[in-house]
Image: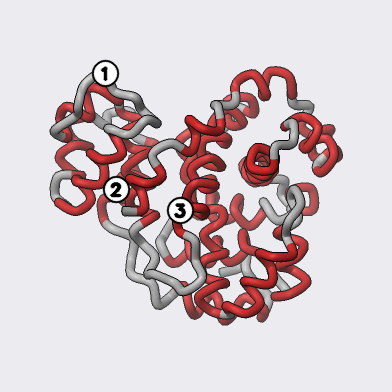
Amino acid sequence: MSSLPHSNLAPFVERASTLPAMPEVANTLIRSFSRDDLSLPEVAGLIGRDQVLAAKVLRLANSPRYAPRHDISSLKDAAATLGLRALRDLTLAACMSSAFPSVIGFDRLSFWRSTLALAAYTQPLARAMGLDEDEAYLGGLVLRTGQILMLMTDPEHAVLAQYQASTIDSAMAVESRLFGCSHPEVTAALAHHWHFPAQLVMAITAACDPLATRPFSRMGAALRLASVITDCRELGVPVIDGLQLMQSALLEHLHLDLEWLDAHLPDHRLATAGVEALVH
């Protein structure tokens, strides 16, 4: 893969190749981003082919994240209640969270809580930047999964990276020092293995250093900013302050209205609601 050239990635690329293929449900949903004729019954029928996935989707649909006014007992009801975007998003989340084996030292609940938040924050960013919100959500959903591969491949350094990356937007720099690469690059290898759209794979890689990437990837920039916002929310730092402190040059390049963005970000508790249903 041309976007992942250096040898430091080799162990992680090899590890990614050992993971199962992404479920056909997820692949079909990813391919559907460009379809205008996708229907709710079609999505519900697709999910219904996998009973384990269907059960997880129903648990998620009934979680506080979506706060349904009544118990959702069927996929048809979930489709009618949530709408196409929400149903597709939560199904992709269910697929991704089930794609990785159990790993010693991996706090699944904490990881997927932050990942759900990151994915949720990509959507208002995408809206502000004129990007596809569904593709941005998927990018946010997988951006940090490279950390799982790092833990599977080199647990000692992965745990050390987690310990040292205790401040806002510090994980990628710490990982680059310890591994010679950072988690978005590892995630891109995994996304390539799962046959994600090439443009999204390149955007995930670009999240490492959006301003240094040529051509400039607005999606990569959105993913990096969503990651910073997630760190801010988890550490209790005001979002605007954190973004200006850590990514001032990128913000200047994008000319984002930070007041608008801050006002349109979902509440962190809402963004992370439903994580228990996701991981069990």
Which is nearer the eye, 167 or 219?
A: 167
Residue 260 vs 199, above or below: the answer is above
Q: Which mark is residue 28?
A: 2
3D distance between C-alphas at marks 1 and 2:
29 Å
On-image quarter of the N terminus: bottom right
Q: Which mark is residue 140?
A: none
Of the residues shown, which amino acid type is indicated by label 2?
Thr
Q: Residue at x 49, y 40 (%)?
A: 137
Q: On the image, numbered disc 1 is attached to which residue?
A: 69
Residue 191: x and y in percent read 48, 60
Of the residues shown, which amino acid type is indicated by label 1?
Arg
Residue 184 vs 139, above or below: the answer is below
Which is nearer the eye, 271 or 39?
A: 271
Q: Which mark is residue 109?
A: 3
Residue 149: x and y in percent read 52, 70
Q: Quadrant of residue 237?
A: top right
Query: Could you say whether the residue bearing mark 2 is in a helix, strand or loop?
Result: helix
Would residue 139 be seen by someone viewing this image from the given angle?
Answer: no
